[in-house]
Image (spheres, grey):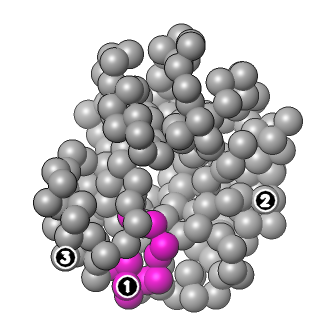
């Protein structure tokens, strides 16, 4: 199962994740998040990273023009959209994108089922709340295009393997403090996600 370590705020944390085997890193361009990173800092980190690692830029309630500009300036390879957008919006994007489904009910996980998408538990705040979604919602569901997020930790990630998700996304579950990753937890999370 593929792994994304989100809320990267330093080069050291980025390299800890990569060396542990992460497939993707997340950079939060949402100023209200405790894991917010500036365009300049993200650009400095990303330009030092090795190839073959997805650099995901996370956005909340911004314009397509802003997303295009940030991704171009930072060299982020994928835009993660934590808000509802229409076809006109996605058509204006110049970078690949990943929708986020903030699921309130079981039916929500079927939204955009023809696309790869990230499914997280709904909460008022955006991202990194550590709230778990009800796994029973995924019983009998084709999860091959779903990246699961929300409340995952090194100790519980193995419990989701049976659903065959495309990937898992973690932020607060591998942190020492907001925006600072724990190398041991990052390694354990990735190891346990690949059992």
Residue 130 lies, in percent from the top left, at: 49, 34
Instruction: State which tag comes first along the sequence, 3 or 1.
Output: 3
Tell me the residue at 17%/61% (across/down).
89
Secondary element at tag 2 = loop
Calculate the distance from the C-alpha at mark 1 to the C-alpha at mark 2.
Answer: 26 Å
Residue 90's place in the image compared with 39, above or below, is above
Q: Residues within 10 Å of mark 2 (few under 14, many from 20)?
A: some
Residue 46 lies, in percent from the top left, at: 56, 81
- In the displayed structure, does residue 126 sit left or right of residue 42? left
Instruction: State which tag comes first along the sequence, 2 or 3.
Output: 2
- Residue toward you, 129 or 99: 99
Tell me the residue at 47%/75% (across/down).
76
Furthest toward the front, the residue is 114
Calculate the distance from the C-alpha at mark 2 to the C-alpha at mark 3.
Answer: 32 Å
Asked whether 86 falls inside the magenta stretch, the response is: no
- In the displayed structure, does residue 97 sit left or right of residue 56? left
Q: Looking at the image, can residue 145 be seen?
A: yes
Secondary element at tag 3 = helix
Tell me the residue at 32%/54% (across/down).
81
Instruction: State which tag comes first along the sequence, 1 or 2.
Output: 2
- Is mark 3 in CB contact (under 8 Å) with mark 1? no
Q: Write down the residue under mark 3.
A: 65
Calculate the distance from the C-alpha at mark 3 to the C-alpha at mark 1.
Answer: 11 Å
- Residue toward you, 95 or 74: 95
- Give the label, 2 or 3, closer to the camera: 3
The image quarter in which residue 144 lies: top right
Q: Quadrant of the N terminus?
A: top right
Q: Write down the residue under mark 1.
A: 72
**What range of the chain is rendered magenta?**
70-79
Q: Write down the residue under mark 2.
A: 21
Q: Looking at the image, can residue 9 be seen?
A: no
């Amino acid at each position: 199962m593929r792994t994304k370590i989100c809320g990267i705020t330093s080069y050291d944390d980025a390299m800890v994740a990569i060396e542990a085997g992460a497939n993707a890193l997340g950079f939060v361009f949402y100023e209200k998040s405790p894991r917010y990173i500036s365009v300049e800092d993200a650009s400095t980190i990303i330009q030092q990273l090795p190839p073959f690692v997805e650099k995901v830029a996370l956005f909340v309630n911004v314009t397509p023009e802003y997303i295009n500009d940030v991704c171009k300036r930072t060299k982020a390879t994928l835009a993660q959209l934590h808000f509802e957008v229409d076809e006109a919006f996605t058509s204006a994007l110049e970078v690949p994108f990943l929708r986020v489904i903030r699921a309130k009910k079981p039916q929500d996980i079927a939204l955009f089922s023809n696309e790869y998408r990230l499914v997280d538990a709904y909460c008022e705040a955006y991202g990194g709340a550590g709230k778990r979604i009800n796994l029973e919602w995924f019983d009998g569901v084709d999860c091959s295009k779903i990246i699961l997020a929300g409340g995952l930790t090194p100790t519980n990630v193995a419990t989701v393997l049976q659903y065959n998700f495309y990937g898992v996304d973690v932020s607060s579950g591998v942190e020492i403090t907001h925006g600072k990753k724990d190398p041991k937890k990052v390694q354990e999370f990735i190891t346990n996600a690949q059992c």
